[in-house]
Image: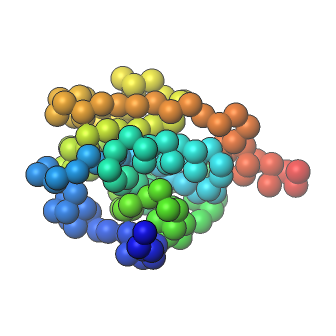
Amino acid sequence: MKFRAAEEKILGRAEVVERLGPGRSFRLVFTNGCFDLLHPGHVDCLERARRLGDALLVAVNTDRSVRGLGKGEGRPLVDQDGRARVVAGLGCVDWVTLFDEETPEELIAEVRPDVLVKGGDYLEAEVAGAGVVWGGGGRVVIVPLVPGYSTSALVRRIREGR
């Protein structure tokens, strides 16, 4: 298997749409998130997502987008380039891109993935872009959360010194 450095996996939005958008010859899985402090729950979700297709694209919220989600003061802890690089460093991840909107729905509409994956804290109908994926004949998959892991809970524990 050929090693790919994290930097090789990070693509700009235009390149993502051109290389991974409609007309591709493989089954693309898409997921997204802030990935502020990568933990076992994130890794489990990404590995499960990757198993659902031929390649996995992960869209990471920009710093501005994270702040707009109301994750709390001082978030994100790690800047967008750092978070993208950490996610891209995982073997199960084929590509990473950043998105600046509140949700990745516009990006999903541009790429039209075959499978859209989110963690178990969502219902299928609540997932941004679900209608686009269903409209293209794709599917939405909710993967169960790993109990005991949450970035917000980890941040709280760190700040409380526990």
Could you tell me residue 63's position as x and y percent? 48, 61
Which corner quadrant of the image does residue 133 belong to? top left
Q: Does residue 98 appear in this view?
A: no
Q: Residue at x 17, y 52 (%)?
A: 25
Q: Is residue 70 left or right of residue 27?
A: right
Q: Is residue 134 left or right of residue 10?
A: left
Q: Does residue 112 appear in this view?
A: yes
Count of picture labels: 0
Could you tell me residue 58's position as x and y percent? 40, 54
Furthest residue to the right? Answer: 162
Furthest residue to the front? Answer: 1
Q: Height in image: 146 above or below 32? A: above
Furthest residue to the left? Answer: 23
Given residues 19 and 79, the one toward you in this image is 19
Q: Residue at x 45, y 37 (%)?
A: 118
Q: Residue at x 72, y 51 (%)?
A: 155
Q: Height in image: 91 above or below 138? A: below
Could you tell me residue 140's position as x and y percent? 35, 31
Q: Residue at x 45, y 24 (%)?
A: 123
Q: Quadrant of the N terminus?
A: bottom left
